[in-house]
Amino acid sequence: MKKQHQISVKAFKAEGFIEKYQRLVNGTVLPYQYSVLNDKAPNTEKSYVIKNFINAGRSINGDTNHDGFYGMVFQDSDAAKWIEASAYSLSNYPDKELEKTVDELIDIISNAQESDGYLNTYYTIKDKKKRWTNLLEGHELYCSGHMMEAACAYYETTGKDKLLNVMLKNAEHIYKVFITDGHEGYPGHPEVELALLKLYRTTGNKHCLELAKHFINIRGVDSDYYKKEKEKRSWTVWGNNAEDNNYQQSGMPVREMSDAVGHAVRAVYLYTGMADLASLTGDKELFSACRRLWESITQRQMYITGGIGSTVIGESFSVDYDLPNDTAYAETCASIGLMFFASRMLENDINGEYADVMEQAFYNTVLAGMQLDGKRFFYVNPLEVIPGISGVSPTHRHNLSVRPKWYACACCPPNVARLISSIAMYAYGENSNTAFCHMFASGKVSFENGMKIHCKTSYPYGFRVTYEIQNGGKLAIRIPHWSKTFTLSVNKKSSNVKPIKGYIYLDVSDGDIVELLLDDMPRFVYASSKVPELTGRTALCRGPLVYCFEGVDNNGDVLSLSLKRNGRVTVSDADDFLNGAIKLRVEAVYTQPTNKLYLDTPPVEKPCTAIAVPYYTWGNRGENQMRVWMNEIT
Amino acid sequence: MKKQHQISVKAFKAEGFIEKYQRLVNGTVLPYQYSVLNDKAPNTEKSYVIKNFINAGRSINGDTNHDGFYGMVFQDSDAAKWIEASAYSLSNYPDKELEKTVDELIDIISNAQESDGYLNTYYTIKDKKKRWTNLLEGHELYCSGHMMEAACAYYETTGKDKLLNVMLKNAEHIYKVFITDGHEGYPGHPEVELALLKLYRTTGNKHCLELAKHFINIRGVDSDYYKKEKEKRSWTVWGNNAEDNNYQQSGMPVREMSDAVGHAVRAVYLYTGMADLASLTGDKELFSACRRLWESITQRQMYITGGIGSTVIGESFSVDYDLPNDTAYAETCASIGLMFFASRMLENDINGEYADVMEQAFYNTVLAGMQLDGKRFFYVNPLEVIPGISGVSPTHRHNLSVRPKWYACACCPPNVARLISSIAMYAYGENSNTAFCHMFASGKVSFENGMKIHCKTSYPYGFRVTYEIQNGGKLAIRIPHWSKTFTLSVNKKSSNVKPIKGYIYLDVSDGDIVELLLDDMPRFVYASSKVPELTGRTALCRGPLVYCFEGVDNNGDVLSLSLKRNGRVTVSDADDFLNGAIKLRVEAVYTQPTNKLYLDTPPVEKPCTAIAVPYYTWGNRGENQMRVWMNEIT
């Protein structure tokens, strides 16, 4: 079987659930985020990102009469992610006004590029001499990477190559510095690797491939690099520990890695680049490392919500089976990166397991990252929130119960926007003869081989998926791991084709109608007792959705609820409630909380019905308790 | 009823369980700790505390040819606590050798006192100009306080007043600085308040009482004091946040306090001083504050083990009901301080609730602070330890599974020693006509009014307590809250006297034999569902002992065990196992842990017997899992 690759965003027109989200991004999220980037949104964290580019352009032209740089060392990347999201959104919904805004921003950015191709406002404005002296914290390669991704996306949507040329020039500059001139070191925050490979895929530029290979291959070979770098320089951004090889994934060459460690976003961005390089070059050793890292994450360190990086300390992976609910970090960006990684793994190996995780991360942590109205965002995605403790206790300060409007470190909001607007790339794949359906995204897809499908479904709340075929070919449809049973028919004729590694493969012809019926039964999920935090607990799921219990539906008190083992679960009708989300009603018992801290008598339990809502909808109705993993009574 | 006060350590000769511990302190702990303080114990953290006193003495005599100061700014206090513990131990077991060692150390200490009465090796050796400039972090008053306590204890045991006079001179010096000369501020780490009151009780010196009152009364009146102090000085010990009024209990005058906040040891040392002052002066407003703080601790912030201060961040109280098991801090010293506080509350109000908590802290957290052989110590006392996570995960680094030999910050080991050797003060109390039995400590007690009792019991493993009376009077015996039933007889004649606020009061005569039979039934304890961490869990207790489950008794895996609600519990015979501790066997189920992280099927449970050991004995048999709060199945 030939490997498959992502489809172009342009090849998909969403309908249903995904369309609602993409229209939200287009109509609300992008304009709102642009107003933030432009410092025109009231009562939000200051961004200044566009002003930084303007000021850098003025600096280059010798005009230093401006108010300098503001924000994080990686502030530029917020603009990049916004352009990338806008590019995808323009593919979905052409919009002359938005395109004009992007063009203007690209003009501003191109003016901020120095004559040698260097592009980073922090250094251009503050101190050019600092360039490339602090790969550990400096984020120059990270910002370049994001702008490369934006350039590819905008070029693919519009055919306009101004930003693409800016970034090719920037890539050449980086090539000169790190390859021609032999500057030592590798990116403190991986990102440029995966971006260079995108640029290579978009333009065929060999230097981009070579540079990505270089950064991946030399990583960790000199595990003391950052230490030496720190000794040589006299400045620091945050005083990061240069010897924390776990945090920055620099402890060993990448082909030797087995455990996912350190800063979770850095980790999955790196692994994405590694997996992409492995698929582009057929590097089996590199793929093996990716597979080990994949297992380390998904078999021992991943929340049921697809959240990863369980500790706030270093925004990091912790150790195997350390998955606290209430102090979870589980950064939105980390789950987005996990989707990237999963998608690249699928290009190496068509295995439903990767798509399962991709879907798990998307429908739970990634969507939870944004308020239903598109105006507020979670950076941190705990699985339990108790007002009075969450956000207040010294160990729970990061666990907010309501989404803020913006963050000083604003990596997550534009990341959600670009992910949602480019969901086509994750939902569908193709090779020259096969169309792959990884996720059940309703809408119309055109494949490069001429085949078209129209996927109709009310997934993730409906479990009937219909594919209307135009121009036949091979069709591969994923059967999710959670669907204990499924029925398949082609033109109403039942098919008993068996899944191979999580996919059924069909030869379909023009006009065929393929109907898949997945398992719609709510299910109780249990964790291995190796996870201390989850013993005695169960989580309620249906399809790809993890459910949670909020105080607002349960008399303000979810702590006192225990679910009945194998209890009856009733699926409600969809209503306007939470944008059409479907509640579940579950047999449970309620224990009156006592004022006495400790008692010698077992709690008095009364039967009751507990109400669950999809995890991604939590925190949309004010501050209240929320719990995913519930106590169980037998 | 006239208030009662602690008995003198000299008035008690322990037998049984307590005697074993006191002999361990005498024979092993004190010699071992002295070798540490003298830097003669192999492979332990360096102490240098005695060397510091020697060097300070040389500095005072103008001899600067020494190797300076080493250790924490409060290093002196380790010697003080060791002297205090030795003093009590000498009361229990006269020992010429030990007494000589203490005398020599007192000579060394007295040589380190400056002519104006100042005593602190850190400042005398390093920089006299820093004196009193950093009350926030400087610990001068803290070290003085501990040495005052040592002086009182050694004087009471031996009648020798050299150290007492040193510390009276030191108190006069402090009086001059803070009262006569009007130096602003109050102790960053409370301790001197309770110590000055001890010195006042021992000597009748009014300046000591006045000074203690002063420090208690001005605390928090200027809540910006530390901020102003920090602005004035150019040095820092750790860079403590001068504006963290919670941490240093400086946010409001003490009479306004309601919530126990901040560094737990500082908090309970302060509250002890407040309660002592309230009982000495009859200050009802101050006692009301103490009562509110007591309730804040014991009704909302205390572990079942009597551990307090649930978070490592600032070694602090967290917020109400935030009582994590695995990341618990629950410092040994904080539970010792809670015993101090409870004992002083008893002097204000004879209420069994105070003695209940005193006992709970002693038999669980305080005793757990020391290895059974007296040679290793816990600073941190978690209620769950899982090797692979505990001590390793970034949020669990402080949760060790085996006791270290010593600590760079060595406050806990000598604190345990002084507590155990002075347990008489907590176990028994008296006023002019009544003997109070707060704890069931076997041994012989002589009260000031001439009454003597001989308490015979194998408590905490036996629940029959016999009191043989010499010279009659009033006898008050606490009935613990956990004893649902009890029987009482005087000279074999059953008595049906009812407890008043947790105590039964008897008029006894010479030769009487009082027999009390407490409830010996193991019991399952539950927490209020307001504690998120403890929903669905139960803890097994018997008498004052909290039990825990260790891997070594349970096939290495306690995470997979759930206890059966109201399951049968069998009490084993005492054996040599863990110094005579008694195991409990409990009906339970065992779930085979799965390699899959998440499963759609309920765990398969097999009936089994789980074995529990007293919490204080955990961690004595190598690294293994430990859990107090177990999952329960109904």
Image (cartoon, coloured by chain):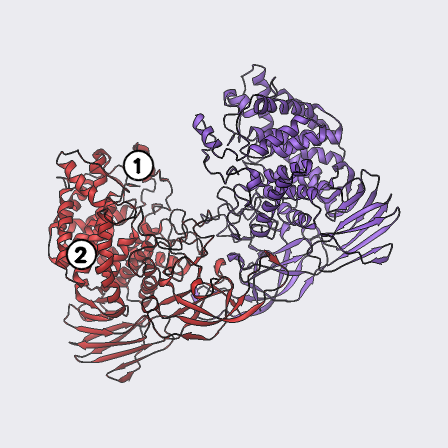
Chain colours: A purple, B red
Q: Residue furthest top?
A: A62
Quadrant showing the C terminus of chain B = bottom right
Residue A78 in sight here: no
Query: Number of numbered discs present?
Result: 2
- As drawn, the label of residue B250 is none
Q: Nearer the viewer, residue B589 or B350?
A: B589
Q: For the point 83% across and 42% down, which residue is it?
A: A452
Q: Residues within 10 Å of mark 1 (few under 14, many from 20)?
A: some
The reply, left or right, for residue A498 in relation to residue A262 is right
Q: Nearer the viewer, residue A336 or B355?
A: A336
Question: What residue type is disc 2 on?
Answer: Ala
**In the rendered image, which residue does mark 1 sit on?**
B229
Q: Is residue B470 above or below residue A375?
A: below
Give the foreground label among 2 and 1.
2
**In the rendered image, which residue does mark 2 sit on?**
B153
Q: For the point 71% across and 28% down, which residue is it?
A: A204
Question: What residue type is disc 1 on?
Answer: Glu
The kind of secondary structure element at disc 1 is helix
Label 2 to label 1, Cα distance in Å? 34 Å
* Figure quadrant of residue A279: top right
Q: Chain of mark 2?
A: B
Image location of residue B217, percent across then percent down: 27, 48
Image location of residue B413, percent across then percent down: 29, 54
Q: Chain of mark 1?
A: B
The reply, left or right, for residue A390 in relation to residue A432 is left
